[in-house]
Structures are given as C-alpha cells and as structure tokens.
Amino acid sequence: MGWAHAVVLVLGLLAGTCGIAADYGGVVKTARGDVLVERGGERLALRAGDLVAEGDRVLTGVDGYVGLTLADETLLTLGPGALLVVDTCSFDARTQEGNLLITLTRGVLSVVTGLIAKRSPDAFVLKTRLSTMGVRGTEFIVEANEL
C-alpha cells in the first residue's frame, strides 16, 4: 500500500471515529447470520465495518443479529427477524447536536443511547406501529410485532 492509500485510510478512520465527515448514520460493529440492508432499491449483505445511512432499512433473518454504533455513540442491537428503518440520522461531532428518528417495524431492538439523547432528549425518537417514544437518555429494549 502506498503512502497516499495510507493517508486516505487514516483519514477515513478518523472521520468514522471523530465525526469529521459524519455523512453516515453509523457503522456495523457485529453481524451474525443473515443481515441485510435495503438501499436504493437493492438488498445488500451487511458485514462488520459496513456503513449504515439515513434512509436505510436494516433487516435480520431468522438467525440474524446485528450491532450498530451510530455517529453519536448510540448502540443499537437487532435480534432475529427484525426490520429497523433509519428515518433520520444526523450528528455534528463539533456541537454534539443532531436528530435521530428510527422505526422498528418488527423484532427486538436493544438501545443504549448516545450523545443525541443526552444533549437534546427531544431529538431522539423511536417509533413502532403502535407507539412513538421520546427517548431521554437510557438503556432499553423494545419489541414490535407485525399486525
């Protein structure tokens, strides 16, 4: 690998960890079994290290689990048979301000909130088919079943 590639790699790593260019929602930290993202009309397999962006639909199969770390350090873990939509996800690492709106259509989701919920509680919203929750900075698990 040449020095230019090394510089690009280091800048990419800094952007992902420091929020220098946080134009993504988060990164896949762990993926096991069938884990897919629907993006731009395509279904793609998700693996550790892949980025997740606003508008993505994350799906897990009957044997699938995925752990996501969002740009504000929110941790999301989806269990088997889940569908999560990243409706809105923005975060400015300099000001530590942002917005997060996610929809859990089915399955189980574990959440450990990050900086968005801590800094501006009204800016973190989780929706299911039957409810909308404002999140105030905490850890919780929610389950959504299709009707």
Image (spheres, grey):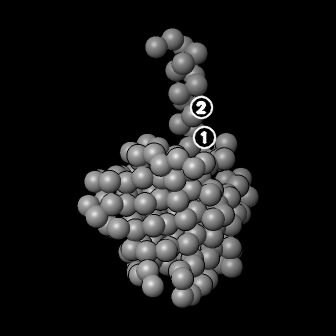
Relative to 133, is 93 above or below? above
- Residue 11's disc is 2
Q: Secondary structure at mark 1?
A: helix
Q: Residues within 10 Å of mark 1 (few under 14, many from 20)?
A: some
Does residue 23 appear to the left or right of 77 in the view shown? right
- Residue 5's disc is none
Q: Residues within 10 Å of mark 2 (few under 14, many from 20)?
A: some
Relative to 33, is 50 above or below? above
| Residues at circles 1 and 2 in contact by the CB criterion of under 8 Å | yes
**Front-lying residue, 102 or 134:** 102
Q: Residue at x 35, y 68 (%)?
A: 81
Q: Residue at x 67, y 42 (%)?
A: 21
Relative to 94, is 147 above or below? below
Q: How many marks?
A: 2
* Residue that protrudes farthest toward the top in the picture: 2
Q: CA distance from mark 1 to mark 2?
A: 6 Å
* Residue that protrudes farthest toward the bottom in the picture: 130
Amino acid type at circle 2 is Leu
Residue 147 position, x and y percent, is: 45, 85
**Front-lying residue, 31 or 1:** 31
> Would you identify the image quadrant in which residue 8 lies?
top right
Residue 45 position, x and y percent, is: 41, 46
| Tag 1 residue | 15
Q: Residue at x 37, y 61 (%)?
A: 60
Q: Secondary structure at mark 2?
A: helix
Amino acid type at circle 1 is Ala
**Front-lying residue, 66 or 16:** 66
Does residue 105 appear to the left or right of 78 in the view shown? right
